[in-house]
């Protein structure tokens, strides 16, 4: 990828909020912010992959000082253009390795952002980076999908998830390497454009091991931000790991 903003450059940032409008609904955002306010407990929050501020802005509105790490300058430009966006400190860089000053009560990664790191090494580094920023007793929160391999019949590696007259969207899985990609065919005025973004899917148990390697332990795992139990039928999870006080 040659763009310095990675896969979230200007062409993606320009329509990012609109293309994921359902994620900006209050019913989605408020429960996440409620959890993070509680975990911050009057302290600071660090968002890894802050993007256009979907979570950071309402979290800051609740009185939590938020610092973000973000690779894409184009995404940060959208954050800055929103009310209150100029007051949030953002460091440009890879959230797996970029360090910022101070410590935090909570660090978090929302909606599958951990999968933007396309190697196991990068994901392990991210956990270590989060732990290094946390004060003792602080928490690291990850919201991420459960890999949908149960939807793959033998010999198939594609899972479609959106089909309309103007868009087809599908994930491609490589079960040998845990590599996946989200692929989009958009049709405008009879012309089609194709885009593809790589990810690496990761299992809950694998994330727990990454947390252990970073010196953290699992505190909670839910199906969603509203605290429903995580089960074998869950398609996503919100997991909270804690940095020990000793």
Image (spheres, rainbow, N blue to C red):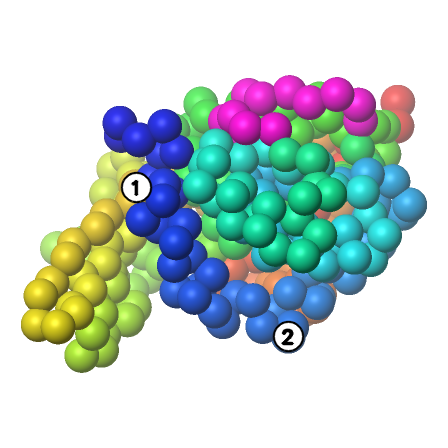
Q: Position of residue 135 (x, y in %)?
A: 83, 28
Q: Position of residue 234 (x, y in %)?
A: 52, 65
* Numbered disc 1: secondary structure: strand
Question: Residue drawn at (59%, 38%), measured in percent from left and top?
Answer: 48
Q: Is residue 175 visible?
A: no
Residue on which disc 1 sits: 198
Relative placement, left or right, of 245 versus 131 is right
Query: Which residue sits furthest bottom?
Result: 165
Relative placement, left or right, of 199 versus 67 is left
Residue on which disc 2 sits: 27
Question: Residue drawn at (42%, 28%), measured in percent from left and top?
Answer: 120
Q: Position of residue 66 (x, y in %)?
A: 74, 42
Range shown magenta = 91-103
Would you say residue 137 sits in the magenta stretch? no
- Give the mark, 2 or 1, whose residue is nearer the N terminus: 2
Within 10 angstroms of label 2, few (less than 14), some, or many (20 or more) residues? few
Question: Residue drawn at (54%, 28%), measured in percent from left and top?
Answer: 92
Q: Position of residue 108 (x, y in %)?
A: 65, 43
* Numbered disc 2: secondary structure: helix
Relative placement, left or right, of 129 versus 23 is right
């Amino acid at each position: 990828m040659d763009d310095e903003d990675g896969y979230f450059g200007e062409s993606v940032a320009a329509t990012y909020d609109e293309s994921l409008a359902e994620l900006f609904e209050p019913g989605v955002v408020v429960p996440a912010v409620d959890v993070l306010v509680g975990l911050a407990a009057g302290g600071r929050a660090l968002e890894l992959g802050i993007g256009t501020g979907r979570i950071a802005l309402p979290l800051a509105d609740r009185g939590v000082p938020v610092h973000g790490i973000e690779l894409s300058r184009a995404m940060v430009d959208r954050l800055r253009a929103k009310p209150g966006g100029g007051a949030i400190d953002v460091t440009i860089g890879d959230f797996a390795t970029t360090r910022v000053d101070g410590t935090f009560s909570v660090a978090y990664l929302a909606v599958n952002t951990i999968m933007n790191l396309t190697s196991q090494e990068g994901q392990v580094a991210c956990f270590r980076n989060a732990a290094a920023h946390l004060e003792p007793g602080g928490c690291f929160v990850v919201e991420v999908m459960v890999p949908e391999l149960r939807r793959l019949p033998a010999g198939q590696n594609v899972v479609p998830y959106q089909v309309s007259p103007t868009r087809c969207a599908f994930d491609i899985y490589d079960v040998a390497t845990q590599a996946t990609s989200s692929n989009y065919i958009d049709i405008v005025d009879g012309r089609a454009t194709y885009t593809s973004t790589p990810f690496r899917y990761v299992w809950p148990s694998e994330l727990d091991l990454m947390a252990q390697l970073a010196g953290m332990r699992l505190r909670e795992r839910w199906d969603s931000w509203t605290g429903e139990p995580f089960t074998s039928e869950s398609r996503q999870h919100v997991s909270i790991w804690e940095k020990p006080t000793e």
